[in-house]
Image (tube, coloured by chain):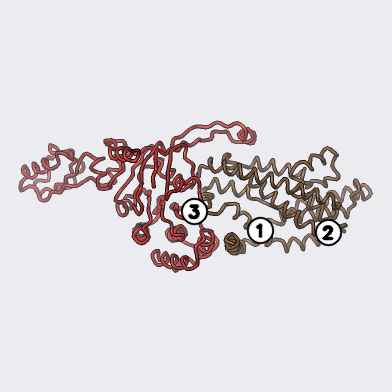
Amino acid sequence: MTLVRTYRALLLAGFQQAAQYRVQSLLWMLFSIVRPVIFLAAWVAVAVAQGGDIGGYRVGDFAAYYVCMTFVSQLVMAWNSHEFEWEVNQGRLSAKLLRPLHPLHYSVVDNVIFKLNTLPVLVIILIAISLSFGARYRTEPWHVLAFIPSVILAAALLFMFNWVIASLAFWATRMRTANTLFQRAAFVFAGQIAPIGLMPGWLQALSFALPFWYMMGAPTEILRGAVTPEQTWLILGGQAAWLAVTYVAFLSIWKRGLRAYQAVGA
Amino acid sequence: MEVRDLRKIYKVHERQTGLGATVRSLFKRTFKEVPAVNGITFGIEPSEVVGFLGPNGAGKTTTLKMLSGLLHPTSGEARVLGYVPWERDDAYLRRMTLLMGNRTQLVWDIPAADSFLVLKEIFRIDDATYRRRLDELVELLELQPLIHKPVRQLSLGERMKVEFAAGLLHGPEVVFLDEPTLGLDVSMQSRIRAFVRELNRRTGATVLLTSHYMDDIVALCRRVVVIHHGRLLYDGALADLAERMAPYKLVAATLRDGATGRDLSLYGEVVSRESGRVRLRVPRAEAAERTARIVGDLGADLADLTLEDPPIEEVIDRVFSGDHPFGEPAREREAALTR
């Protein structure tokens, strides 16, 4: 109950703050959907050039895939590793560490506020893209129901993964390399560059074993209705398992990180 | 508060810049060890206001960071309010605060009053207590016109006052103040001092204060702890600091017209000479005898004579420059705490 009251206060203050940066938030959201839209346009062009079909994916399937991918990417987006590096280096983290509330909670609130602020515009844009490219969804009601826990697990997994990377800032002054490695890996294995179904078998197997696909590709496939109930259960299980592993890793790294924290600049 | 043999050795990471070096640094790193706090021992009683003195890099802020739970020490022990600070128990965090001059903990884009409401929930302050404390802080710090403006629109001094309120809303029993008047004008420094004094009187909070402004220390602290190069040099009454650390006194002699040229160097070391006013440094043990000689020898040529301790700034400067007898009181207190 106390945590609920704290979250309510943080959300109120956060919304007031975000109100002053609405345009910036919208621009940030627009920048982040440019890449999937470019990939959509590229795959559509290739599909049309090859007679309208690549590996079973037609133009409408690509459109559905990238519209869902864009939607999921926005819902699961996390940027706390960038922010945390800045906070550690500028000494801003110290103010948070002096309070009886884990710094993670402030990130949860920032994250939720950004998404709630940008979601309405995003949905309008995605409906427009869907209509323009003739997106073909095979989504059934149970897919939508399964999508909800899947996207929540994906968001939590990406968020915690970001915190694992963020916590490395306790030891390394600059975290850009680790972030870049993570983003490049996610780019390939999460299904951003292409649907996993179009990749060679070994790459598919690797994607299913690594955590990245469970962060974006998996809920995308559920939302566009491309998975069976059995596959959905496997996906949810994989997401829960990776979330547990990531959370335990975070707790361990955070505890060690606090011992190494040098509170520079503060 | 009890601190025993507290040490903090910083391991400073040495590496080259660039992508390759960054990747390598994730696996293999080289460090240089820099001792910031080198085995200090002291204790502070509840409700005491203690000045923590030392030049830049002496280890003051590092000590405060350890005592507030931000830093883990390399070795040593500390207990504040019965807690080991770096275990970061939530109950401990609710009972202490660390306020650092020029550092903000408030959200810049919203009024301080809204940040206060967030702090109220984080520190679990009940409604009645929150209203009472806020009213007190608003009154003491004259915050009424400030707390409804976005923090970024406040001047440095105004922001510092609001930061004080934010850091004290939860009614901490231990207050660590690190350079609280840094960068503030004389009038605002004076108000902050008055506020800290009143806070200590009203709430009985224990205060450990660092400041480069000796006026802060003189106004607030009867006791000071002096550290240099991470080691404790002196722990005792501020009034005794001059006696312990500066083995001399200052004689100011004002000569009458016609005698302004008299040589006084045979009575002590002439520190300054302006028209008829001569300042002499004399050994503390011989101060009375030399003063009597001056009075006797100069007779009617002397218009005025005063004998005083050197200014506290001068004493501190001597301490930090290493020109002092080493702090026996500090060692005595260390021995007492160890027993």
Give the amino acid type for the residue marked by disc 2 in the picture.
Answer: Trp
Q: Position of residue A118 (x, y in %)?
A: 70, 61
* Chain letter matching colour red: B
In this view of the protein, which residue sits in the foreground, A253 or B87?
B87
Residue B125 visible from this viewpoint: yes
The brown chain is A
Count the marks. Answer: 3
CA distance separating discs 1 and 3: 28 Å
Marks 2 and 1: same chain?
yes
> Which residue position holds label 3?
B91
Disc number for residue A112:
1
Q: Earlier in the sequence, mark 2 or mark 1?
A: 1
Label 1 crowding class (10 Å Cα cut-off): few <14, some 14-19, many 20+? some
Residue A52 x %, y %: 92, 50
**As drawn, is B121 to the left or to the right of A145?**
left
Query: Dot 2 falls on which chain?
Result: A
Quadrant of res B272: top left
Up/down of B79 relative to B34, above or below: below
